[in-house]
Image: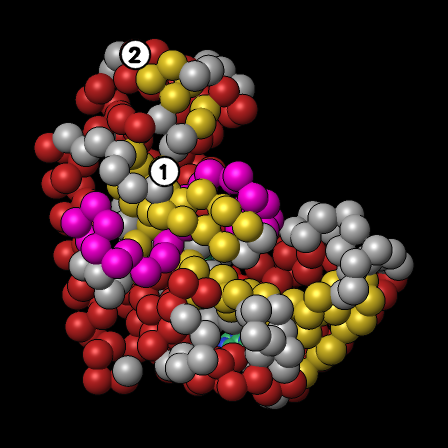
Amino acid sequence: MNKPIRVAVTGAAGQIGYALLFRIASGQMFGPNQPVILQLLEVPVEKAMKALEGVCMELDDCAFPLLAGIIQTSKPEEAFGDANWCCLVGAKPRGPGMERADLLKDNGKIFIEQGRIIDRVAAHDCRVAVVGNPANTNAMIAASQAKRLPPDRFTAMVRLDQNRAVTQIAKKANVPVTAITDLFIFGNHSPTMFSAFHLAKINGKPLTQVIGHHEWLKGELQETVGKRGAAIIAARGASSAASAANALVDHVRDLMTPGAIHSVAVKSNGEYGFDPDVWAGLPVKTVAPGQYEVIKGLPMDDFARQKIAATNKELVEERNTVKDML
Ligand code: NAD
Ligand code: LMR
C-alpha cells in the first residue's frame, strides 16, 4: 500500500459531491493501492454542514479499506492544507434558461479566494481540477491567483463532453463506446465547444469513413453535445450530477495514468489558434502521473478552424468579463 494522499473536494454536500466521494473512497479515481484522506469543504451554513455530516456518516458506513481519514470543514485553509489534489466542485449550478457564463460573477469570486489559498497551503505536487461552472474560466481565475503553483497544475473538466460525444457517435454507428477513440473536445464547456469528429476513429478507422452523414456530424452531434447540460436541466429540474462525478473520476484517473490520451481544459499557450491565456479543451497525453503534454499538430480543416475561432472568442469574452477581479 502507498502512503495516503490528501484529496480536497469542495461543495462536498452537493449533488455532484454525493455521487463523487464514494467513488474516490472506493479507489476508482486513484486505483486500488492508493489510500486517500478526504478533506471536504462546505459553506459555513448550518444546513450545508449538517448535510456534510450525514454524507461523512455514510462514508464511514461503507467501511472503505482505502479511506484513511475524513476532514469535514468550512475553512478552506483546512480543506486545502497539504492537499495533493483539489477537486473544485463547490459553486452555484445554473437553472433553466441560464447559460453557464451567467454564473461567472457569482462563482468567479469563489475561485479567486480558493486559488489564493490553494497556492498558499496545498502540497508542492498539488493538482487542481475545476468542475464548478463556467469551469474553463474558473480554472483560469484560480490559476491567476497562484504564484507558487504553475498554471499547468490547474485544469478544468471537458471530459463530460467527451463522454457525451463518444456515446452519441457510438449510437449513430451502432458500435460499442469502446470502439471510439481520439474523440477530443476543443474549447469551452459551453454550447460553443467543438467535438472534433474529423480526428476520431471507429475501430481504428477514420470516423468520417464509417459515418458518411457529414451534416449530422457538423450539425446534430455538435448541438446535442453542446446543449446536453441544458437538456438534462430541462428534464431533471437539476443539473447533471452522477455523469459529472463520473467524468471527474475519468479526468483525474487519466491524468494520473501515463499514456492516457484524453480531453482536458488547460492553459492553451496558443495551441490550435487559441488565445494563449485562456483555458481551452485540448487533446492531451499523460506523460507521468499528474503530468501531461498537449498533443500538437493535429490537422484542422475550415470547419474545425471556424468552430475553434468561435469557442475561443467566447473564452476571451469570459476572461474580459472578469478581468477586473484578477
Ligand atoms: P449543488 O448546488 O448541488 O452543490 C454545490 C455545493 O457547493 C453546495 O452544497 C454548496 O453549499 C457548495 N458551495 C457553494 N459555494 C462553495 C464554496 N465557496 N466552498 C465550498 N462549497 C461551496 O451543485 P452541483 O450540482 O453539485 O454542481 C456544482 C457545480 O458543478 C455547479 O457550478 C455546476 O454548474 C457544475 N457542473 C459542472 C459540470 C462540468 O462538466 N464542468 C457538470 C455538472 C455540473
Ligand atoms: C453540464 O454540462 O451538465 C453541466 O455543466 C451543468 C450545466 O449547467 O449544463
Q: Position of residue 207 (x, y in %)?
A: 34, 19
> What's the residue at 22%, 70% (across, down)?
319
Query: Between residues 179 and 45, which one lies in front from this camera angle?
Result: 179
Position of 183 compared to 9: left or right? Answer: left
The mark found on residue 209 in the picture is 2
Position of 244 compared to 298: left or right? Answer: right
Q: Position of residue 62 (x, y in %)?
A: 85, 57
Q: Amino acid at mark 2?
A: Gln
Q: Is mark 1 within 8 Å of ligand 1?
A: no
Tell me the element at label 2: helix
Position of 206 compared to 37: left or right? Answer: left
The mark found on residue 42 in the picture is none
> What's the residue at 26%, 58% (across, down)?
269
> What's the residue at 57%, 59% (across, down)?
16
37 shown above or below 200: below
Residue 272 visible at all: yes
> What's the residue at 43%, 16% (across, down)?
204
Q: Position of residue 298 (x, y in %)?
A: 26, 34
Residue 234 visible at all: no
Local crowd size for mark 2, using a 10 Å CA cut-off: few (<14), some (14–19), many (≥20): few
| Mark-to-mark CA distance, 1 and 2 | 18 Å
Magenta part of the chain:
253-274
Position of 193 compared to 11: left or right? Answer: left
Q: Position of residue 235 (x, y in %)?
A: 45, 45
Q: Which residue is mark 1?
A: 184
Q: Earlier in the sequence, mark 1 or mark 2?
A: 1
Residue 13 colored magenta? no
Q: How many marks?
A: 2
Colour theme: secondary structure
Q: Amino acid at mark 1?
A: Phe
Quarter that holds the C terminus = bottom left
